[in-house]
Amino acid sequence: MKNLEDLFEHQLKDLYSAESQLIEALPKMVKKATDTKLKDAFESHLEETKEHKERLVNICKTLDIKPGGETCKAMEGLIKEAESFMKETTNHEVMDAGLIAEAQRVEHYEISGYGTAARYAKELGHDDIAKILKKTLDEEYSADETLDQLAEGRLNKKAI
């Protein structure tokens, strides 16, 4: 990478890989969740994640970038950690509380990634792309807030 444009391209490919991996992982989390509202939150975010991936495809088309070809190692690690947790935990209440923790790790990673990409887009003069990335960033914040409300509202208490 020689400049911010190259770094921006790398960020977009990383996010595309992260979203692709998450689309594969979220259905497993839906199956493991026992709380109806948590299942609904995961299913809703799965649909949102598919939209996020499609937005990245469109952004890459606009910039003449091929989105594939990279593997987001951070998301790979976060998903492996979540899968390990799901194998080890048998108590339903603890499973739900832990799934929220695992999902929030993913959300925080995505918030960081989309925040950085939106900033790069703006600095590079891609204002329309920056707005699209900001929209996704806002949706990631919203997903994190939903998980916070579920955890603090009752699921963590059930796990005690």
Image (cartoon, rainbow, N blue to C red):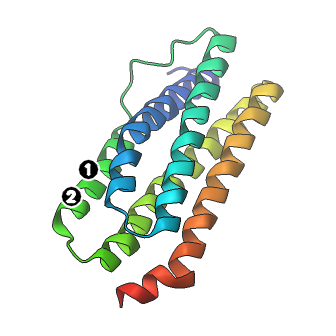
Amino acid type assigned to the residue bearing label 1 in the image: Lys
Quarter of the figure with residue 21: top left
Nearest to the observer: residue 116 or residue 78: 78
> Considering only vertical position in the picture, is 112 above or below 98?
above
Left or right relative to 104: residue 72:
left
Quarter of the figure with residue 64: top right
Q: CA distance from mark 2 to mark 1?
A: 6 Å
In the picture of the structure, the residue carrying the numbered disc 1 is 80
Residue at 31% from the left image edge and 60% from the top image edge: 32
Q: Name the secondary structure under disc 2.
A: helix
Judged from this view, the residue extending furthest toward the top is: 64
Judged from this view, the residue extending furthest toward the left is: 88
The image position of residue 29, as x and y in percent, is 36, 54
Q: Name the secondary structure under disc 1.
A: helix
Q: How many marks?
A: 2
Q: Are marks 2 and 1 in contact (CB under 8 Å)?
A: yes
Amino acid type assigned to the residue bearing label 2 in the image: Ser
> Considering only vertical position in the picture, is 29 above or below 37?
above
The image position of residue 151, as x and y in percent, is 51, 77
> Considering only vertical position in the picture, is 81 above or below 130?
below
Left or right relative to 37: residue 130:
right
Nearest to the observer: residue 154 or residue 131: 154
In the picture of the structure, the residue carrying the numbered disc 2 is 84
Left or right relative to 79: residue 103:
right
Residue at 38% from the left image edge and 46% from the top image edge: 27
Nearest to the observer: residue 136 or residue 147: 147
Nearest to the observer: residue 55 or residue 67: 55
The image position of residue 65, as x and y in percent, is 57, 12
Residue at 39% from the left image edge and 74% from the top image edge: 97
Rendered-image quadrant of the C terminus: bottom left
